[in-house]
Amino acid sequence: MATRHTTDASFDEDVRQAAKPVVVDFWAEWCGPCKQIAPFLEDIAAEMEERLDVVKLDIDDNPKTPGELGVRGIPTLMVFRDGEMVAQRVGAMPKSALKQWLDSVV
């Protein structure tokens, strides 16, 4: 797996203190659109591994971080650079649109 998982406890270390930009996928097991984009994120994590990391945070198991960041719908994708959130998208999108968005942000 090219993506990694993070938790409320490890979010600061995995995301805010990361050396390169991090895409965080806020998801849940019951979320159909989350499952739809999961393979796209795996591909992008492998294709763009030199430029960014992709981590997933299950909102059911880790409610603190999504609450603090104002996540209201899933899937929500946030890009963090130097510890700060610099971009956000809510909802599923085709792989081409997701890659284009990330290319423009990272």
Image (cartoon, rainbow, N blue to C red):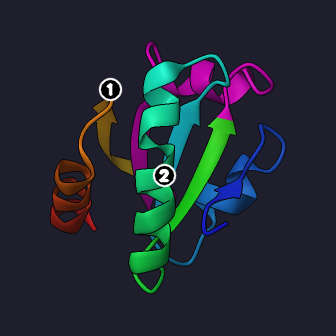
Position of the N terminus by quadrant: bottom right
Residue at 49 percent of width and 75 percent of height:
46
The answer to which of 62 and 67 lies nearer the viewer is 62
Answer with the quarter of the image where residue 59 lies: top right
In the visual, does 96 lie left or right of 10?
left
Q: Give percent across and percent down for residue 20.
A: 49, 76
Left or right of 48? Residue 66 is: right
Q: Dot 2, crowdedness within 10 Å: few (<14), some or many (≥20)?
A: few
Left or right relative to 49: residue 61: right
Where residue 69 appears, x then y in whole percent?
Answer: 51, 27
Quadrant of the image for the C terminus?
A: bottom left
Residue at the spot of label 1? 91
Check residue 81 for magenta coloring: yes
Residue found 17% across the figure and 50% down from its top: 97
Q: Is residue 103 visible?
A: yes
Does residue 66 sit above or below 73 in this rendering?
below
Residue linked to disc 2: 39
Q: Which residues are magenta?
A: 58-84
105 in relation to 32, above or below = below
Task: Indicate the secondary structure of the residue bearing disc 1.
Answer: loop
Judged left or right of residue 106, residue 73 is right
Disc 2 marks a residue whose amino acid type is: Pro
Chain-order first, disc 1 or disc 2: 2
- Residue 106 against residue 16 in the figure, above or below: below
Q: Residue at x 52, y 42 (%)?
A: 25
